[in-house]
Image (cartoon, helix red, strand yellow):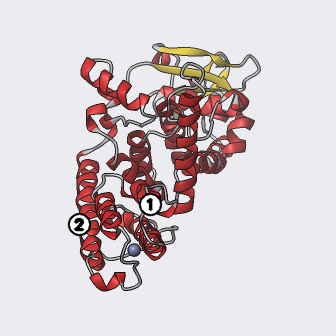
């Protein structure tokens, strides 16, 4: 590469160190212009064996004495990648303490997407593992984890309303993960373990509250404001592909069918042999059936476990039965999420695999 071929490149001042001993020239293969970073071979080599090999091999830019391969006296290494991605990676190396990655941050996927792409390509294992762990920790992979997060979100909203702190505490949307970006990231980098929770969460959000349309559509903006006031959450639907929408619709339909089959099983009068004659079992059964038709069955059934409903007039065996049934149904549904949404799964992940005809 000669000086002329990088004449349209710009130096990135935040990553152009005076004592740097290599210049990274980043631009896509057929792109125009790019960015130049003056960094340290030792830092690049320390994180990636690909760079280490590049600097130790003879006749490659690092050892070249050919002036056309030099920029301001330093050897040039060309990276055929998006300059912004390379900048994100180098910032992560040099300013790790200033790279804010907080748990549940809805912006995490967009912050790390470019870095993950380079970490994968250049086999930067330490960076890859740290970032993957960050994303995976944001999405529950078990029902107790799911319930814990849901409890936390609910509590936060209650505090916001009861203590009248709407200005001090941001909306749940600004604090907890957003499913659209997470699904897109998970599918690109095979982070399949987060998909069941992300798809289930997406399945209970409203497309009329698409964050991507918020800026251009007052109606959408009003819808989102309404959801926020109730402590609800929204998604950025622009990240979803045609296949993602197919999975989502399939999942909703499968959940509905699964619940219908369970509702049918409950219509058995012998189940109430131990019921007190004065018991309002019809009332509790009607509530239970209604919960099965909800767009958020996991949440609606939880009320029967915590007995967060009007239990007056319902006998103890019926209350216990509702609790048991709700527990079993929630566990079954959670375990079957990968099949219900037809998700790709790792063979050795935390999810148990079922066949759809077993539903
Ligand atoms: Zn009863």
Q: Residue at x 30, y 27 (%)?
A: 223
| Residue 217 at least partly seen | no
Tag shown at residue 312: 1
Residue 102: image quadrant is top right
Secondary-structure class at tag 2: helix
Secondary-structure class at tag 1: loop
Foreground of the two, 167 or 13: 167
Q: Residue at x 43, y 28 (%)?
A: 229
Q: Is residue 114 left or right of residue 93?
A: left
Cα distance in 3D space between marks 2 and 1: 31 Å
Q: Position of residue 98 (x, y in %)?
A: 69, 27
Q: Nearer the viewer, mark 2 or mark 1?
A: 1
Q: Is residue 94 left or right of residue 113?
A: right
Q: Quadrant of the C terminus?
A: bottom left
Q: Is residue 51 left or right of residue 341?
A: right
Foreground of the two, 252 or 278: 278
> To which residue does mark 2 refer?
257
Nearest to N terminus: mark 2 or mark 1:
2
């Amino acid at each position: 590469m000669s000086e002329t071929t990088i004449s349209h490149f710009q130096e990135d001042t935040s990553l152009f160190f005076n004592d740097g001993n290599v210049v990274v020239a980043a631009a896509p293969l057929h792109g125009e212009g790019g960015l130049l970073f003056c960094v340290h071979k030792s830092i690049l080599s320390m994180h990636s064996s690909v760079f280490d090999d590049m600097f130790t091999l003879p006749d490659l830019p690092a050892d070249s004495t050919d002036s056309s391969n030099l920029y301001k006296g330093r050897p040039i290494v060309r990276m055929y990648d998006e300059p912004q991605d390379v900048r994100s990676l180098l910032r992560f190396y040099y300013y790790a303490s200033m790279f804010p990655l907080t748990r549940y941050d809805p912006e995490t996927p967009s912050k790390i997407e470019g870095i993950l792409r380079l970490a994968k390509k250049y086999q930067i294992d330490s960076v890859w593992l740290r970032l993957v762990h960050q994303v995976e920790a944001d999405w529950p992979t078990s029902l107790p984890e799911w319930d814990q997060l849901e409890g936390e979100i609910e509590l936060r909203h209650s505090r916001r309303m009861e203590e009248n702190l709407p200005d001090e505490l941001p909306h749940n949307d600004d604090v907890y993960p957003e499913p659209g970006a997470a699904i897109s990231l998970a599918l690109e980098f095979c982070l399949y373990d987060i998909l069941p929770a992300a798809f289930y969460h997406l399945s209970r959000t409203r497309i009329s509250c698409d964050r991507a349309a918020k800026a251009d559509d007052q109606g959408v903006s009003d819808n989102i404001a309404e959801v926020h006031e109730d402590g609800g959450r929204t998604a950025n639907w622009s990240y979803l592909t045609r296949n993602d929408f197919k999975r989502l619709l399939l999942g909703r339909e499968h959940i509905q069918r699964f619940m219908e089959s369970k509702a049918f099983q409950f219509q058995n009068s012998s189940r109430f042999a131990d019921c007190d004659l004065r018991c309002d079992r019809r009332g509790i059964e009607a509530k239970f059936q209604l919960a099965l038709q909800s767009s958020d069955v996991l949440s609606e059934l939880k009320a029967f476990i915590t007995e967060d409903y009007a239990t007056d007039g319902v006998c103890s065996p019926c209350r216990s039965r509702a609790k048991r049934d709700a527990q079993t149904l929630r566990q079954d549904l959670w375990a079957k999420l990968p099949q219900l949404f037809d998700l790709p799964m790792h063979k050795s992940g935390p999810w148990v695999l079922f066949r759809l005809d077993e539903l």
